[in-house]
Every structure is written in C-alpha cells, then in structure tokens.
Amino acid sequence: MSESVEISLTAVSAVGATVRPRWYFYPGVGRRDMPPLDLGLGLGTSGLDDPTTCTETVVTALEAGYRHVDTAQMYDNEAAVGDGIAAAGVDRDEVVVATKVHPENLAPDDVRETAHASLDRLGLDRVDLLYVHWPMGAYEPAATLPVFDELRAEGVTDHVAVSNFTPDLLREARAILDSPIAAHQVECHPRFKQSTLRELAAEFDHHLVGYSPLARGDLLDDPTLSAIADRTDTTTAVVALAWALERGVVPIPKATGDHVTENLAALDVTLSETELETIDAMTDGDRQIDPDDAAWN
Ligand SMILES: NC(=O)c1ccc[n+]([C@@H]2O[C@H](COP(=O)([O-])OP(=O)(O)OC[C@H]3O[C@@H](n4cnc5c(N)ncnc54)[C@H](OP(=O)(O)O)[C@@H]3O)[C@@H](O)[C@H]2O)c1
C-alpha cells in the first residue's frame, strides 16, 4: 500500500487527547478518508488459550518488533491479547490490532454489540481491522456489511476486512460495502498457495493476509523447504514465511517461546528468484482448515 502523509488535522484537543486526522493524502492517489494500513508480518493468537502465556507472547512479540496482532472473538483471548498490548513498551498507535466477528454474531445488532464488547475486552477504543470471520452462521451480506460500514464511520474500526471468502463473495461484499475491503484473510502457505485470491487481492487493492502460514506445523519437515533452509542458513519455518512476504502475502504465524523471534527473521531473508520459483512449483495439498459449511464447499 502506498505511503500516506497525515495532513495536519492531527491536533491536541482542549482536554489533551490526540485527535486522529479525519483524512489523509496519499501521494499519487489523493485524498482518502482512511488512515494508512501498513500491514507487516503478524502474530497469530489462535490457540493461545492460557491467558498468561497469551499475554507474555504478545509482549515478547511486540518488544521483538512485531507491529500486527491477530485475534478473534472465537479465540476467547481478546482480554489477554489486550493485556499484552498494554504491557508492551510499544505505542498502541504503532500496532495494527485485528479482531474478527464470530459467525454467530453477524446479525446486525449482534455485530454492533459484540464489536463494542471486543473493544472492552481488548481495552482499546478502536481496532485497526475488524473482520467478518467466516461468511456463514448469521452472515447475511445485505444486512451484515452495512453495520461494518457504520462501525468504521463511528471509529470503532479503522478498516473493514473479510476472511474465508470466495471470489464471488468478495465481489458481492465489495458491491455492498461503502468501505473498501482492506484485507482478505485466508489460509495461505507453500502447500496451499491461493493463486486466484492473490491475483484478486492485487486487482482489488487489498492485503492478502495468510493464515496458517506454516500449515499448522505440517510444513516444517517439507524436503523442498528444508533444502532451501539449509542453503540459506535459516529454518524451514522462516523460508515459508519469507516466501509469503516475497509473494505479497502478509503471514500471521502463531508461535510461542523462541519461535516468536525466530519467525521475525523472515523479514531479513532474501530468497533468490530460483528458490521462489521452486516453492511456487510445489504441489498444493489439502487445506488445514476446511469446515463442511465453508463457502468453498
Ligand atoms: N481467519 C481464520 O479463519 C483463521 C483460521 C486459522 C488461523 N487463523 C489465524 O492464523 C494464525 C496462524 O495460523 P495457525 O495457528 O492455524 O497455524 P500456523 O501459524 O501455520 O502454525 C502454528 C504452529 O506452528 C508452530 N510454529 C510457529 N513458529 C514455529 C517455528 N519457527 N518453528 C517450529 N514451529 C513453529 C507453532 O508452535 P509453537 O506455539 O510451539 O511455536 C504452532 O504449533 C492463527 O493463530 C490465527 O490468528 C485465522
């Protein structure tokens, strides 16, 4: 995404609170009413069920350099994630905080009520990204999506995003929403490369956020990735994440302990064009996450 210049509407109000700019100027693009979205490698938090571990992991990640944290109502850890954001020595405004509305909460009143409940649990007055987690359950595009527009207009979220959509559902959502779709989050890794959705992300100008970027650990003994890791003196996990970054995908690995900082090394690894093409040529396998009522089934 292009860099933007915050026009000088940023100010300090009479009560001392920072007033966020109401519009932004993007060189070459012009005036837009949204803050820029600088989306780098993120920390996934699904499975961080123990609150203490979750909070400590978020603190470790932010202090190591992560600036994007991904949670969801479904993960039941928004409070622990929020505690980590508060405890880390990093300015909240430097962090992209993403949460997702549970598919059972996608009726209009429930979207509104539970988005505010998410903010309360996170201890924040806004999130950067509010996703439709799955287009199923109570998802009714014409009823659900306008509430996401309203929540953006009200400042509950800076950006509207979707997850687990098909190309047709993406097109439908784009037609209904006033807001641009800022990100589409789907499973994406070297064994499930999502070429169609990556092309659509480029065409529609949204971020493709890749979940399960390590195929939930299944990639870690892959011989092709391991050979590249040996040659480049890094680990298989880092090679998978570096491939995603080089191909314009924003990976959000879930990690604990030393894996948190290990994965950041993906930002410093440069894979050669031959190595990237070798990974591109890997055969796609099955999805890791494939519920029967997913839109693609
Ligand atoms: N939108 C959706 O529907 C959706 C669905 C699934 C996931 N997600 C998001 O995507 C995030 C990531 O996906 P995921 O959790 O399914 O899978 P993942 O990130 O592909 O894999 C996580 C697994 O990899 C291990 N791991 C991480 N870094 C490692 C390293 N450097 N070396 C060895 N093992 C490593 C982790 O173990 P340790 O904990 O031991 O490090 C964990 O077992 C989730 O946490 C969630 O935020 C979204």
Image (cartoon, grey):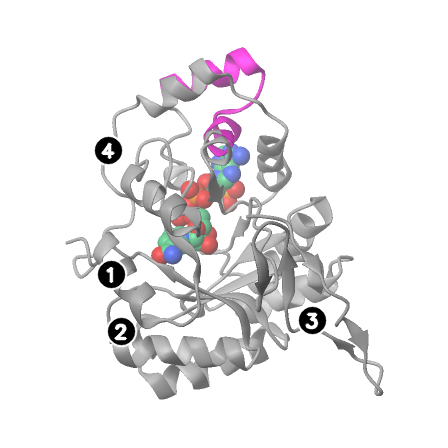
Dot 1: element: helix
Q: Look at the image and say whether residue 162 sits in the magenta stretch.
A: no
Residue at which label 2 appears: 141
Marks 2 and 3, Cα distance to the nearest angstrom? 30 Å
- Of labels 2 and 3, earlier in sequence is 3
- Of labels 4 and 1, earlier in sequence is 1
Q: CB atoms at circles 2 and 1 under 8 Å apart?
A: yes
For label 1, being within 8 Å of ligand 1 is answered no
Residue neighbourhood size for the residue with mark 2, other residues' Cα within 10 Å, grouped as few (<14), some (14–19), many (≥20):
some
Identity, as a three-letter code, of the amino acid under mark 3: Pro
Dot 4: element: loop
Dividing the picture into quadrants, the one containing residue 219 is top left
Q: Quick one: 245 or 238, which is closer to the camera? A: 245
Q: Which residue appears at 26% of the width and 43% of the height? A: 287
- Of labels 1 and 3, earlier in sequence is 3
Residue at which label 4 appears: 285
Q: Is residue 270 above or below residue 97?
A: above
The residue stretch that appears in magenta: 222-242
Marks 4 and 3, Cα distance to the nearest angstrom? 45 Å
Q: Which mark is residue 21?
A: 3
Q: Quadrant of the C terminus?
A: bottom left
Q: Position of residue 262 (x, y in %)?
A: 61, 34
On the rendering, which quadrant does ligand 1 occupy?
top left
Residue neighbourhood size for the residue with mark 3, other residues' Cα within 10 Å, grouped as few (<14), some (14–19), many (≥20):
some
Identity, as a three-letter code, of the amino acid under mark 2: Pro
Marks 4 and 2, Cα distance to the nearest angstrom? 30 Å
- Of labels 2 and 1, earlier in sequence is 2
Q: Position of residue 154 (x, y in %)?
A: 54, 82
Marks 2 and 1, Cα distance to the nearest angstrom? 9 Å
